[in-house]
């Protein structure tokens, strides 16, 4: 698997192909796709050290809901107001963490793990149903998560013949 620091460069090389795979996958059997992605999720994450990677915590700016603000500020022994001033910015979508990488990321992982925002919990969805509804996020996550990048590469292998034909057909029908 690619090391986290090599991901950006590697993603640039396959980005166009990954968007094409996304278009191809939209036409595939959703249940089959779910079972392949779930299988790969289990196999790849079982042997991967997320704490040593932490790329997602360096890249995402999670929304923090009011109930999460309450829980995290209590853990940090701050009032909700103090917590907001120190760690959050108000946006149209709500309060978001005001720094990248996330200030709660430590060498041993997330320091507020028990109370981490729903946005962080939802970042990884390759074990969820109906992957076909999240293909855009999946392509975007290939630029951040080495495991998702690898899942996409394995999907290319799994659908190799059909995907190659799809690429030829798409190129032939692309208007000049
Ligand atoms: S709150 Fe925790 S899980 Fe969420 S981005 Fe920050 S360090 Fe990562
Ligand atoms: S980017 Fe992926 S592999 Fe890295 S810590 Fe996040 S979920 Fe784990």
Image: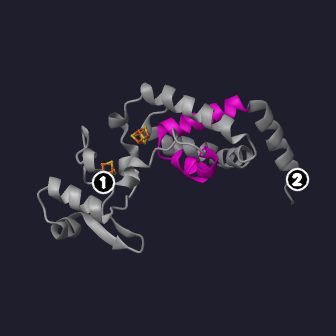
Residue at image point 19% right, 66% down: 80
Q: Indicate left or right for 83 with 128 as reference.
A: left
Q: Main secondary structure of the magenta part?
A: helix
In the displayed structure image, the side of residue 146 where residue 13 appears, left or right: right
Q: Position of residue 98 (x, y in %)?
A: 30, 64
The residue positioned 76% from the left and 38% from the top of the image is 163
Measure the alpha-carbon separation of dots 1 and 2: 44 Å
Q: Please state if 145 lies on the left or on the right of 86 as rendered.
A: right
Query: Which residue is at 20% across, 70% downward?
Result: 85
Q: Which residues are magenta?
A: 131-159
Q: Which residue is mark 1?
A: 102
Q: Is mark 1 within 8 Å of ligand 1?
A: yes
Q: Name the residue tied to disc 2.
A: 173
Q: Position of residue 103 (x, y in %)?
A: 25, 54
Along the viewing direction, whichever of 69 and 155 lies nearer the viewer: 69
Secondary structure at badge 2 equals helix
Position of 110 relative to 85 (above/below): above
Q: Is residue 58 or residue 69 the one in the foreground?
A: 69
| Mark 1 / mark 2, whichever is N-terminal | 1
Mark 1 closeness class: few <14, some 14–19, many ≥20 residues within 10 Å:
some
**Cβ–Cβ under 8 Å for marks 1 and 2:** no
């Amino acid at each position: 698997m690619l090391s986290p620091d090599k991901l950006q460069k590697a993603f640039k090389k396959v980005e166009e192909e990954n968007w094409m795979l996304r278009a191809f996958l939209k036409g595939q059997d959703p249940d089959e796709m779910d079972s392949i992605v779930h299988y790969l999720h289990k196999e790849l994450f079982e042997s991967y050290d997320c704490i040593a990677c932490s790329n997602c915590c360096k890249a995402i700016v999670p929304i923090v809901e009011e109930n999460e603000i309450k829980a995290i500020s209590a853990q940090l022994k701050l009032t909700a107001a103090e917590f907001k001033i120190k760690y959050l910015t108000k946006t149209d979508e709500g309060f978001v963490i005001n720094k990248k990488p996330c200030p709660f990321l430590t060498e041993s992982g997330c320091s507020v793990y028990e109370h981490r925002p729903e946005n962080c919990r939802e970042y990884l969805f390759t074990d969820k149903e109906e992957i076909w509804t999240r293909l855009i996020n999946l392509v975007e996550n290939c630029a951040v998560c080495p495991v998702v990048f690898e899942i996409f590469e394995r999907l290319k292998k799994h659908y190799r013949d059909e995907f190659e034909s799809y690429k030829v057909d798409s190129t032939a029908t692309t208007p000049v």
